[in-house]
Image: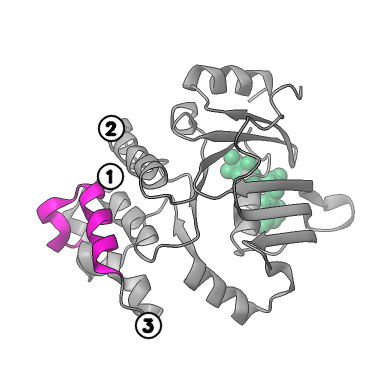
Amino acid sequence: MSTLLTASPGTSAAATAARATGVTKAYGSGDAQVLALDDVSVSIESGRFTAIMGPSGSGKSTLLHVLAGLDRPTAGQIFIGDVDITTMNDRELTLLRRDRIGFIFQAFNLLPTLTAAENIALPSKIAGRRPDPLWVQSIVETVGLGERLGHRPSELSGGQQQRVAAARALATKPEIVFADEPTGALDSRSGEQLLQFLQHAVREMTQTVVMVTHDPGAAAHADRVLFLKDGDIVDEMASPTSDEVLDYMKQLGA
Ligand SMILES: Nc1ncnc2c1ncn2[C@@H]1O[C@H](COP(=O)(O)OP(=O)(O)OP(=O)(O)O)[C@@H](O)[C@H]1O
């Protein structure tokens, strides 16, 4: 099925935040080899919210990890902006991730001894930068943590902790934010708050977000959904609804 693959009008002119060309990722060798990604090419537009969906084992996390420079492809190229990151050494990749990319994982990965506000400011501090106070203030206001900013993670709910993690990812104004199942550990209300925060960051604050999810309701917050099957992007959908995504996932056999 390829009827949905045509880009919608207006999307072709968008700047590209990240790009994969002919990317393959193999694990193991010989008979035991698994092709997690099989010649994937895709562009992620700046200022848009992209979701990655597909059946279990289809390669979603692998694609996110190679796009984000957390893992290296076996073949093909990955670009962040105009920079080919596949030629970088480990140190260059570490600096690129620190300076240009934000991450949100299923496990919140907050430092337990720091307050929410200190956790949000940490990546900028590590990078030796003073975060833009107006930007951080707008992030913090949008994330809706109020007086809980002075609390440590153990004093926050899971949903609040994940919103701290999301604010932390955005505080450095990264070129692109990668989120791997960010709502996976949250109840539906907390998940919805997080998704609305990400959606707001994209629509009102021109951030770029790429999110792996199993949840059609989460994917419906995105501007575009990429569907993976057996390590390849088999289709995409613009302005998806939850029902459309669910129907398509059923067709994929998920
Ligand atoms: N480190 C690894 N070593 C060996 N095989 C791996 C490794 N990581 C992933 N794979 C395999 O690569 C394929 C794609 O895995 P990946 O985690 O990207 O899929 P996914 O779509 O994110 O799955 P899920 O929805 O279950 O999280 C699977 O067959 C998986 O078993």
- The answer to the question of whether label 2 and label 1 lie on touching residues, with beta carbons closer than 8 A, is yes
Q: Earlier in the sequence, mark 2 or mark 3?
A: 3
Write down the quadrant of residue 117 in the picture.
Answer: bottom left
Q: Residue furthest left?
A: 147
Q: Is 231 covered by the magenta stretch?
A: no
Q: Identify the residue at horizontal 72%, vertical 68% (top origin).
A: 86
Q: Quadrant of residue 104?
A: bottom left
> Residue 100 versus residue 165: which sits nearer the camera?
100
Q: Earlier in the sequence, mark 2 or mark 1?
A: 1
Residue that label 3 marks:
128
Residue 113 location (% of width, % of height): 22, 71
For image coordinates 44% across by 27% down, the residue present is: 217
Q: Amino acid at mark 1?
A: Gly
Q: Which residue is mark 1?
A: 159
Which numbered mark, 2 or 3, is in the foreground of this view?
Answer: 3
Secondary structure, mark 2, is helix
- Please, which residue is most extreme toward the right here? 30
In reply to whether residue 137 is colored magenta, the answer given is yes
Question: Is residue 41 rendered to the left or right of residue 172?
Answer: right
| Distance between mark 2 and mark 1 Cα atoms | 8 Å
- Identify residue for label 2: 189
Residue pictured at 42% horizontal, 49% vertical: 206
Q: Amino acid at mark 3?
A: Gly
Disc 1 residue: CB within 8 Å of ligand 1 = no
Q: Could you classify mark 2 by the number of other residues whose Cα lies within 10 Å: few (under 14), some (14-19), or many (20 or more)?
A: few
Q: Name the secondary structure under disc 3.
A: loop
171 or 62: nearer the eye?
Answer: 171
